[in-house]
Image (cartoon, helix red, strand yellow):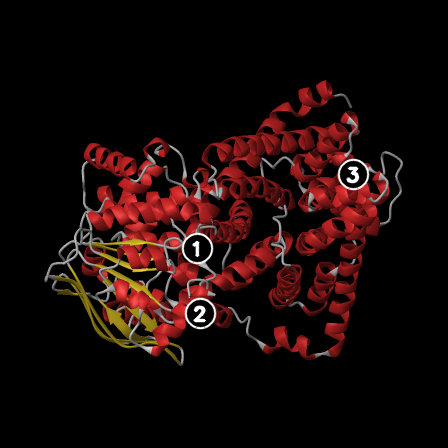
Amino acid sequence: MNGAHTSIRDILYEPPGPKARRAIFWATAASLAALAALAALIVRQFYVTGQLDGKYWSIFTRYTTWRFLAKGFAGTLEVALSSSVVAFAMGMLLMMGRISRSRALNWLCTALIELSRGIPTLLFIYFFFLFAPQLGLKLSAFWKITLPVAISAAGVVAEVLRSGVNAVPRGQTEAAVTLGMRGRSVFFKIVFPQAFRYVIPSLIAELVIVLKDTTFAYVVNYADLMQNAKVLISNYDALLSVYLVAAVIYILVNYALNKMSVAVAGLTRTPAMPGK
Amino acid sequence: MEQGQKIVGKEPIIELRHINKHFGSVQVLKDVSLTVHKGEVVVIIGPSGSGKSTLCRTINRLETIDSGEIVIDGAVLPQEGKQLAALRSQIGMVFQSFNLFAHKRILDNVTVAPRDVLHTPKKQAEAEAMELLRRVGVGDQAHKVPAQLSGGQQQRVAIARALAMHPKAILFDEPTSALDPEMIGEVLDVMTELAREGMTMVIVTHEMAFAKAIADRVVFLEDGQIVEESTDPKAFFDEPATERARLFLRALEH
Amino acid sequence: MSITALLTQFGDRYLAALWTTYKLTALSFILAAALGIVITVMRISPIRPLRIAADLYVQVFRNIPGAALLILLVYALPYLQVVLSYFTCVLTATTLIPAAFCSEYLMSGMNTISPGQIEAARSLGMTFLQMIKNVVLPQAVRSSVLPMTNLLVATMLTTALASQVPLSPTDLTGIVSYISTHAVGGVTAFLISAALYCATAVVIGQVGNLIDRKVRILR
């Protein structure tokens, strides 16, 4: 009967007595009224500034609008997925270096992880946007956004993977060694698959951060959801509505990813580890 | 009267009158009435799911009741507010899972309520706490935090914490169920000592030998009902009056 | 361009940029923490509409990209006749987003408290406020140290958004693009900014670890 309470929310307050019930009733009514007033104020502001006008919103009844936004979103996804793959590869290498027995490699990878985690994505983007050409690196807009976003995520991915490896019980390695398996094959066949299972939720959560970072694609002129929204805006002169819809798309997609992360965490029965 | 048996007073400390409680559609307490007198040790036994823990927890309203009345030392247990807190402060509680405050040192675990609820001066509260900790045998642990103590030690601290409020009675909700076998004895010893000193106690337990030794009265609960009550624990455990109690006790022997 | 040459020419601007980043970080963090606490109180209140509104807040602002929020604040709000200065826009964005994460950290910090401790506090006769003061708050705060240092670093990284609006003085990211348009070989500028960000992040992390080791609750 005690185990039924899972969250602090459910246990913090006692079952209310009559007085508390009355207080909660009135507070609920008052807060409902306040929230309704706030909503009304916002809607009113939209109304008096003419932003509720049909011309701003009717474009969303058109198939072409959504197709164009979808095309932009495809660009966003392309960058996000490519970045994730690159970040995973880099994170994997960093993690291997971090847990290796070589002191120098250890130190180097620790430093690289700190750099990846301690520098804003935008600064990495500026590096690829402004200076990579000066250094003789000719990159397409796609890579100019994909690489910095990946670099920015790699450090967290490395740490997430490492926490997964650390969570695999020592006995697993020992058992494999007694069976005559060798170091590398123990790691890749026994330890890592388990570690990976543990950290899937955290990796999905990191995908959210990657997806958010791709919105800086406008800096390098890559056609993502935001860029296509901008084109729509200049075509239809409907800035507020289009940007609002774009923001809601991002929020919903990320929300879905987070939900997925929690669901997967529930399946693998390990709590999601904190990301960046 | 047998030698060594203490005299139980006539003054009721806890009165439960016609308590009913449901969890959803399941009725877990069915018209339960029980009076605990001053200095009395009442042991509640019964199969798991019989409602004995719930009954114990209704006494200080950690569980609400649907109907009935709970009277603590002549005052009806209120449903909320300062009055409820005040009555609770007079009834100690010891939980199955110890529930010490994880961030506080052992000494502070014992002093926090006396200082904040009873407004006992710090010096006095600490002196009393040290005395209590020594009494339950963990005086030398006072400056550690709960996680550094064994389960048995933690439970003894929990008893000291309850005692520090100078309660009129203490409720024990399966105090040894979460303990490793070798630690059960040390906690039961402290409880036996308390009983000898005349503390009013309500104990929910699965330790039948202990129950037999310590109880002034045994209450056998099944399916939310008091099936049998006996002021002669020896007789109850050797030859219970009801068939259901007999079945329960026999099942335990195997 | 060498570091000395760069610092002679742009040294003052660099200091100003560093100050802008620190100022934005500190202001955002304080405001985000305050807002995060308010949101958390709403989320754990027994008042349904407040719970729902605060939950919604957290979901919106932990999922919206910083750039999208900043663009809305800078370009869309004026259409609703709400015109904020660039600095206010940035500060708003770098406050609203970390506040959502702050609330998430506080919630998980509180969830580390076993329900049994709350029942124990009640059984000792503590009132709701006494329980909050003695049991809930101290534990929630102490187990939030590491998440909060992470939040402080994340907030600092978020303030790079300031480079996306014309601010004077600009921030540590903005100055890199400024220098690269006013001089050749701005890679040095990039390196200096990167080093400053990273050093700050490492220091914050170390201090956080130090505090955490002092106050961590053994379980």
**Label 3: few (<14), some or many (≥20) within 10 Å?**
some
* Residue C141, above or below A53: above
Q: In the picture shown, does residue C150 fall above or below A142?
A: above
Residue occupying image coordinates x 86% and y 40%: A182
> In the rendered image, which residue does mark 1 sit on?
C40
In the rendered view, tell whether residue B138 sits above or below residue B208. Answer: above
Numbered badge on residue C207: none
Residue type, mark 2 in image: Ala
User: Chain under label 3?
Assistant: A
Q: Is residue A208 visible?
A: yes
Q: Position of residue A37 (x, y in %)?
A: 39, 70
Q: Nearer the viewer, residue B76 or B141?
A: B141
Image x and y of residue A48, in percent = 48, 71
Q: Position of residue A164 (x, y in %)?
A: 69, 47
**Callout 3: SS:** helix
Q: Is residue B223 visible?
A: no
Q: Nearer the viewer, mark 3 or mark 2?
A: 2
Residue depicted at 75% across the width and 33% down the height: A109
Q: Nearer the viewer, mark 1 or mark 2?
A: 2
User: Which chain does the residue under circle 2 lie in?
Assistant: B
Q: Quadrant of residue B171?
A: bottom left
Dot 3 amino acid type: Met
Q: Which label sits on residue B251?
A: 2
- Check disc 1 and report its element: helix, strand or loop: helix
Q: Disc 3 marks which residue?
A: A96
Left or right, A134 with respect to B248, comes to right
The image quarter in which residue A66 lies: bottom right
What crowding class fits label 2: few (fewer than 14 Cα within 10 Å), some (14-19), or many (20 or more)?
Answer: few
Report helix, strand or loop for mark 2: helix
Which sits in the foreground, C184 or C57?
A: C57
- Up/down of C146 relative to B223, above or below: above
